[in-house]
Image (cartoon, rainbow, N blue to C red):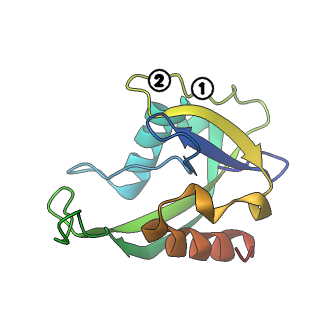
Amino acid sequence: MVNPDGALLICERVNIPCAWQFPQGGVDAGESPEEALHREVREEIGLNPAHYDVIDRRSGYRYLYPPDVRGRKLRKHGNHGQEQTYFLCRVHPESPPVNVDQKPREFRAFRWIPPGEFDLDWLPPFKRDVYRQVMRDFFSVRL
């Protein structure tokens, strides 16, 4: 999400202080990526599709989960990692403010930053290469 001034929305995870990321989520069975986008944005930050436009979409970003404490491959939902599609959305000027006070709550706070100010140290190491590529692809920013 970017606002009309081009600032990027980042959200701090409720359960991990100082862990800032983009709103995100999975695709449910029978759901298209676009439907998942709209559902996740509504669930996580309280904006409906009428509040923003999708201006770009890119697929094929992948990462593997790190091994668990015993060195075994970590699995979530039966997978060793994720393949992701990222959407760039521009919030309309007249849209309501972002509201992270949703049920269940995933984020404790949010802020808008220039894309070049994103700090990869806010992320776990296994996600950094994907975010580095996303920032390059969508904003021509090298982190």
Vertical arrangement, residue 115 with respect to residue 50, above or below = below
Q: Residue at x 61, y 32 (%)?
A: 109
Vertical arrangement, residue 23 with respect to residue 141, above or below = above
The x, y position of residue 45, in whole percent, is: 54, 33
Q: Residue at x 51, y 34 (%)?
A: 107
The x, y position of residue 62, in whole percent, is: 39, 75
Q: Amino acid at mark 1?
A: Asn
Q: Quadrant of the C terminus?
A: bottom right
Q: Amino acid at mark 2?
A: Gln
Q: Residue 99's quadrant in the figure?
A: top right
Residue identified by numbered label 2: 102
CA separation in Å, label 2 and label 1: 7 Å
Within-10-Å neighbours for mark 1: few <14, some 14–19, many 20+: some
Checking the image for residue 48, the label placed there is none
The x, y position of residue 13, in whole percent, is: 50, 40
The x, y position of residue 76, in whole percent, is: 21, 57
- Where disc 2 sits, the SS reads loop
Residue identified by numbered label 1: 99
- Where disc 1 sits, the SS reads loop
Horizontal side of residue 14 vs 98, given as left or right? left
Q: Residue at x 31, y 52 (%)?
A: 27
Q: Are marks 2 and 1 in contact (CB under 8 Å)?
A: yes
